[in-house]
Image (tube, helix red, strand yellow):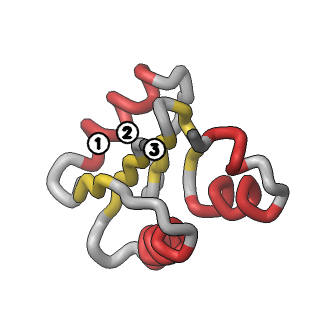
């Protein structure tokens, strides 16, 4: 079973797009609303995934692999490389 995590805020249009794409692919996800902890999320994910400069949402993690934001997710999907991250 795939583990998909997405860090979002309520009003972010890219977060909504990412969730819509994940849902259309039949991927369940765990959503973390970071409205009140945005700076902490940026710092934690930057350190955990060695990705300096994280400063946006959504942030997407699939099976422990850092994907990045919506544009990264869409690019992986369009290039068929998303399958490589999925079980």
Mark seen at residue 5: none
For residue 86, side relative to residue 45 (left or right) = right
Q: Which residue is found at the position 47% from the left and 30% from the top?
A: 64
Mark seen at residue 42: 2
Q: Quadrant of the C terminus?
A: top right
Q: Which residue is found at the position 48% from the left and 77% from the top?
A: 20
Residue 16 in which image quadrant: bottom left
State the separation of the CA atoms marked 1 and 2: 5 Å
- Please tell me whether mark 2 sits on a helix, a strand or a loop: helix
- Please tell me whether mark 3 sits on a helix, a strand or a loop: loop
Residue 54 image position (x, y, % from top left): 49, 40
Residue matched to label 1: 39
Label 3 vs 1, first from the N-terminus: 3
Residue 77 in which image quadrant: bottom right
Residue 76 image position (x, y, % from top left): 73, 53
Q: Quadrant of the N terminus?
A: top left
- Please tell me whether mark 1 sits on a helix, a strand or a loop: helix
Q: Nearer the viewer, residue 57 or 23?
A: 23
Labels 3, 1: front one: 3
Labels 3, 2: front one: 3
Mark seen at residue 2: 3
Q: Nearer the viewer, residue 32 or 80?
A: 80
């Amino acid at each position: 079973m795939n583990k998909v995590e997405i860090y979002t805020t309520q009003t972010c249009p890219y977060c909504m797009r990412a969730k819509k794409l994940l849902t259309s692919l039949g991927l369940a996800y765990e959503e973390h609303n970071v409205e009140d902890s945005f700076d902490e999320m940026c710092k934690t994910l930057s350190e955990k995934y060695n990705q300096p400069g994280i400063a946006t949402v959504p942030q997407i993690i699939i099976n422990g692999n850092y994907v990045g934001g919506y544009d990264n997710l869409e690019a992986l999907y369009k290039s068929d490389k998303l399958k490589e991250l999925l079980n």
